[in-house]
Amino acid sequence: MLTERHLQIFVALAEEQHFGDAARVIGITQPPLSQGLRRLETLIGAKLFERGAGQVELTAAGADLLPYARRALASIEELRQAALAREPEGPEIRLGLAPEVPTSTGAAVAAACGAVISGSRVTVVTAPTSSLVNQVSTGRLTLAAVQHPTVLDGLEAGPVSLLPTWALVPASIVDGEVVSLRDLKGLPVAVRPRAEAPAARDLFLDTLALHRPDGGTVVVTDERAGLAMVAAGQAVVITADPSLSAPGVTRHRLADDPLPVRLRLIWSRTRTPFLRPNDVMHQLTKALAS
């Protein structure tokens, strides 16, 4: 079936003449862009581009069909705007945030939702990544900021944003603004339950074990519980939240930043058509990375 994404790939490649640049414009990676182009060419039965070393050029068929693709995309956008105009109170955007999203980052994404989608009403919920993916899939949420990697079950996703992290440790355990994970020996690292984000948690634990063979982990319900354990001298917390602090706790940058929090926005391909325009997702992704 011919989809809007196929048309976006066609137009972006024609304008950028480069696979990587076109993928960035659309907000996807290069492999799905290449796959989408192959499907489009199969669907219409014509070769649209001549491929070179990273560069692409329109074929005669591609040049003939490009104006139709542009008009189709313009018509889809007009349909969206007409649908939004029928909602006097504006669309409701239900935003989900994983617990790992820092407070300031979540606020920036929520503000961006209201700014880029005129007249929208934004509601925010916090839930584990696994729950957020399910809620976006079933339409209970419009979009969500979740941990990466995770199984997306056919959802669309923006690029991955890497948020730097700090180590929160009991005072006097280590000195210096920057420490390595090996310096944090003797205390377990507080982690949230694996079921909340299995793939992301496994990546975290594998990286932690590589850089810090001893010390182990302890499971906590949330960062506040982890922070309390740090203050009591019983654990270490790795966090991307610059505001998380407590008396008796010191904050240190991790050398080489081995444990960044990986976040990305996800949304449904079919349930939230007003989020599809590239400029909207671009602004939301910028807010997520800020």
Image (cartoon, rainbow, N blue to C red):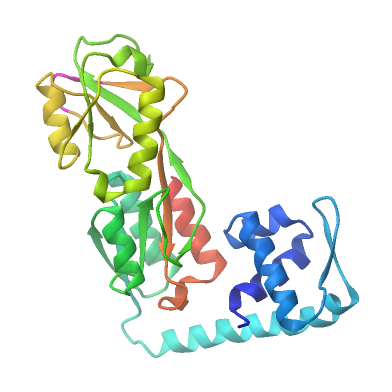
49 lies left or right of 280: right
Residue 281: % across, % down: 49, 62
146 lies left or right of 82: left
Vertical position of residue 80 compared to residue 21: above or below: below
Asked if the stretch drawn in magenta spans residue 248, the answer is yes
Which image quadrant is residue 38 in? bottom right
Q: Residue at image x 40%, y 30%?
A: 207
Q: Can residue 177 be seen in the rendering of this structure? A: no
Quarter holding the C terminus is top left
Dominant SS of magenta comes to: loop
Which of 163/19 is in front?
19
Which of 91/68 is in front?
68
Image: magenta residue range: 246-250
Vertical position of residue 259 compared to residue 77: above or below: above
- Farthest residue, direction right: 60
124 lies left or right of 208: left
- Farthest residue, direction left: 232
Which of 130/288 is in front?
130
Vertical position of residue 264 compared to residue 82: above or below: above
Which image quadrant is residue 48 in? bottom right
Residue 161: % across, % down: 47, 46
Q: Residue at image x 31%, y 82%?
A: 89
Q: Residue at image x 12%, y 23%?
A: 231
Residue 230: % across, % down: 16, 24
Q: Residue at image x 13%, y 18%?
A: 233
